[in-house]
Amino acid sequence: MHKFLRAVGFSKIKTRKELTEIINKTIQEATTREYATLQEEGNELFAIFCTDFADGLGLAVCGEFDEKDVFTYEYYYPYLRGSKVSSGEDITVERHAATESYAGVCDENRIGVTLIFYLQNIIAYKKQQNEKNLPIKGTTLNLSALSVKGTIVLPVAKSSQQKRAIRQKYNDRNRLISAARQGNEAAIESLTLGDMDTYTTISKKIKTEDVYSLVDSFFMPFGVECDQYSVLGEILEYKAVVNKLTKETIYIMRINCNGLEFDVCINAADLMGEPKVGRRFKGNIWMQGIINYPNK
């Protein structure tokens, strides 16, 4: 059973029989059907059937058609489609070892770590690969995430002047990180000294202040799987949707985490607190992404 099924409203599925029924329904009543040839595997036809069970979220079933046009199910995953562009950085895509699924890798300066995500639009990538168009410059990335446990945290009070100063600080840090990656020793030294100052300041204040009043947001790897993260970010917008099959309520939130914006969905039963614009979401997420290829 996929751990993140409950994030899209399937928290009550407990048996293999119930799961098989949902998979069959997804294949038979698919909202979208996409196909691509696997040239490296004898030109077999790879297919993805996606069914939306609420606005922008649902289940995807992936598999192959044989020479008799019989579909064999290989794997499935729940998804949330990102509503807006999150990044314009260059992206590298790598295939997973066990299945015909892919991970995207993006060097995103704003979060300070290499961002790894589960690729949703595999068919678009395979078509570009078959046409020998890769690598492609000028792509953008829509990020989204699924969570099975989260908490709403109150915001840190900031004046408009403080908000401007924070944005300027983010921009300056991003420029330093870009310069450091190109081997600029002055930028590397400046970043190192800045991190040391931050560590010293927090170490003193943490004795008398709550950690979430000192740390406005964070984005860091979580667990052993490379596309899962622990995040804390400001809620920019949110909405509640209902899974049309199970009638479970799911919250979809657009959050800003260290300057990176992406959508998160979580089952209402798994979220502690009430989401509001300006409040913060804290939780562990599974990151997904859609690569937008430029029109020729």
Image (cartoon, helix red, strand yellow):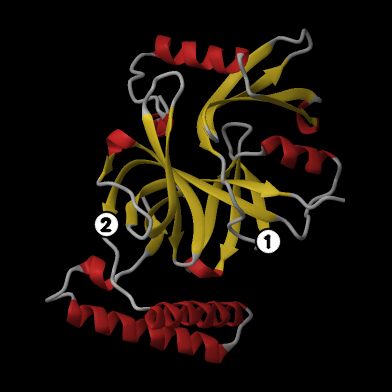
Vertical placement of residue 250 versus 73, above or below: below
Q: Which mark is residue 216?
A: none
Q: Residues within 10 Å of mark 1 (few under 14, many from 20)?
A: some
Residue pictured at 40% horizontal, 28% vertical:
9
Amino acid type, label 1: Asp
Q: Position of residue 277 (x, y in %)?
A: 38, 56
Residue extending furthest toward the left: 208
Q: Residues within 10 Å of mark 2 (few under 14, many from 20)?
A: many
Residue 224 in view of the camera: no
Amino acid type, label 2: Val
Q: Which element is circle 1 on?
A: loop
Vertical placement of residue 62 versus 186, above or below: above
Q: Which element is circle 2 on?
A: strand
Q: Position of residue 253 (x, y in %)?
A: 43, 48
Quickly name the residue at label 2: 153
Mark 2 and mark 1 in contact (Cβ < 8 Å)? no
Estimate the spatial distance between the alpha carbons at disc 1 and disc 2, rounded to whole Å: 33 Å
